[in-house]
């Protein structure tokens, strides 16, 4: 118990100070990146501070893994440099057992970081981007163009040149109806279509049917017009960054894209990454423990350098696996989780063969 108190007595202050430092650094970086835009649009200082306040939860989210890495590497290196760990090892306590409280803390913080992202970071960051877009006159429109939507389990395919969100109207619409074996049934065209109650009403519409070796054009059959029930929400400009929304919203977005026959590999990889990324906290702590004390000279600098190099390598591996997942070379879940599992295993091996 005293060893745990000794460990946390040194660890907690370093963690708090490093956390505050990195949060401040990231917040200032966000301000400086946008400072010219703020000045050119004469944004009041109070508004800039409000935008920065909304960014702080995101800065905390980014800072936690870095601060945990620094605090772990610094504290253990300091123990090694002052030969305090010699007494710990001489008493029969292994490195793993001594640092187990840090691993438990990092695991708890990993789960907490996911919850923090879902309920604090995502809403705050949404307010930040919305307010920033408003003061910088960056308008976002829900209208959309060049739309292709697959509906009714692939039996209906919509193609429209433009969707006006305010009027809920589609322009230059072509609808392809397919049979159960996915062969062509008929085609409906219209200059425009207006959403009314629960279906689309065609304007200047025609129906084309291949019959007896000829393509016949006629007035659209009510039976087929009544099947045009895909809601306007489907045609809106709903492209979102999965990393910037909650897991529930990301899952709904992926399901909608799949229903519409659109590619979802990238979105799925980033969706799984929302669950795997918080465990970077566990990875960096495990790496720092495994690499600490590998030299007797310049212990602090060498441990920090090795830990940073290992974490950079982790991010490189993660970038590669995420790209492979996005190109569907590997499953999306593997693209997100493989680097975490790989480095946990490697760190466990390093801890196992550490000098104690």
Image (cartoon, helix red, strand yellow):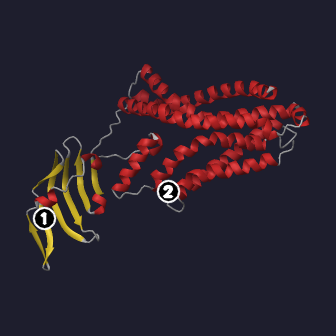
Q: Nearer the viewer, mark 1 or mark 2?
A: 1
The residue at which mark 1 appears reads as: 207
Image quarter where the N terminus lies is top right
Residue closer to the observer: 350 or 17: 350
Residue closer to the observer: 300 or 69: 69
SS under mark 1: strand
Q: Looking at the image, which residue is at 15% across and 74% down?
A: 210
Q: Residue furthest right?
A: 90
Q: Looking at the image, which residue is at 30% across and 62% down?
A: 154
Tell me, for residue 40, which label it has, or none. Answer: none
In the shown orientation, is residue 214 left or right of residue 260? Answer: left
Asked where in the image residue 177 lies, by quadrant, the reply is bottom left
First reached walking from the N terminus: tag 1 or tag 2: 1
In the image, residue 287 above or below residue 322: above
| Label 1 close to label 2 by CB (< 8 Å) | no
The residue at which mark 2 appears reads as: 326
Residue 124 on image: x %, y %:
45, 30
In the shown orientation, is residue 232 left or right of residue 131? Answer: left
Residue closer to the observer: 56 or 114: 114
Q: Does the image show residue 29?
A: no
């Amino acid at each position: 118990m005293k060893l745990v108190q000794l460990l946390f007595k040194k660890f907690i202050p370093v963690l708090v100070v490093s956390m505050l430092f990195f949060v401040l650094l990231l917040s200032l970086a966000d301000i400086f990146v946008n400072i010219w835009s703020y000045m050119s649009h004469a944004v009041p200082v109070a508004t800039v501070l409000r935008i920065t306040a909304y960014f702080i939860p995101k800065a905390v989210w980014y800072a936690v893994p870095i601060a945990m890495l620094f605090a772990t590497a610094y504290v253990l290196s300091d123990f090694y440099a002052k030969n305090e760990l010699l007494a710990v090892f001489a008493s029969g306590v292994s490195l793993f057992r001594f640092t187990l409280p840090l691993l438990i803390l990092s695991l708890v913080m990993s789960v907490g970081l996911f919850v923090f992202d879902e309920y604090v970071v995502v809403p705050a960051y949404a307010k930040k981007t919305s307010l920033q877009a408003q003061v910088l006159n960056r308008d976002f429109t829900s209208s959309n163009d060049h739309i292709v939507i697959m509906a009714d389990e692939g039996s209906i395919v919509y193609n429209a040149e433009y969707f006006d969100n305010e009027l809920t109207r589609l322009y230059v619409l072509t609808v392809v109806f397919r049979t159960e074996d996915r062969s062509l049934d008929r085609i409906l065209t219209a200059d425009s279509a207006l959403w009314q109650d629960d279906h689309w009403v065609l304007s200047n519409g025609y129906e084309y049917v291949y019959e007896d070796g000829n393509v016949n054009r006629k007035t659209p059959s009510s039976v087929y017009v009544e099947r045009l029930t895909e809601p306007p929400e489907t045609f809106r400009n709903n492209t979102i960054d999965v990393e910037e929304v909650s897991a529930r919203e990301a899952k709904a977005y992926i399901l909608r894209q799949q229903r519409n026959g659109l590619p979802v590999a990238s979105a799925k990889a980033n969706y799984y990454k929302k669950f795997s990324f918080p465990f970077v906290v566990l990875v960096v702590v495990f790496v720092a423990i495994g690499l600490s004390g590998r030299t007797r000279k310049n212990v602090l600098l060498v441990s920090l350098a090795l830990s940073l190099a290992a974490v950079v390598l982790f991010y490189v591996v993660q970038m590669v696996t995420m790209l492979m997942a996005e190109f569907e070379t590997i499953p999306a879940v593997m693209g997100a989780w493989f680097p975490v599992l790989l480095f946990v295993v490697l760190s466990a091996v390093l801890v196992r063969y550490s000098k104690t």
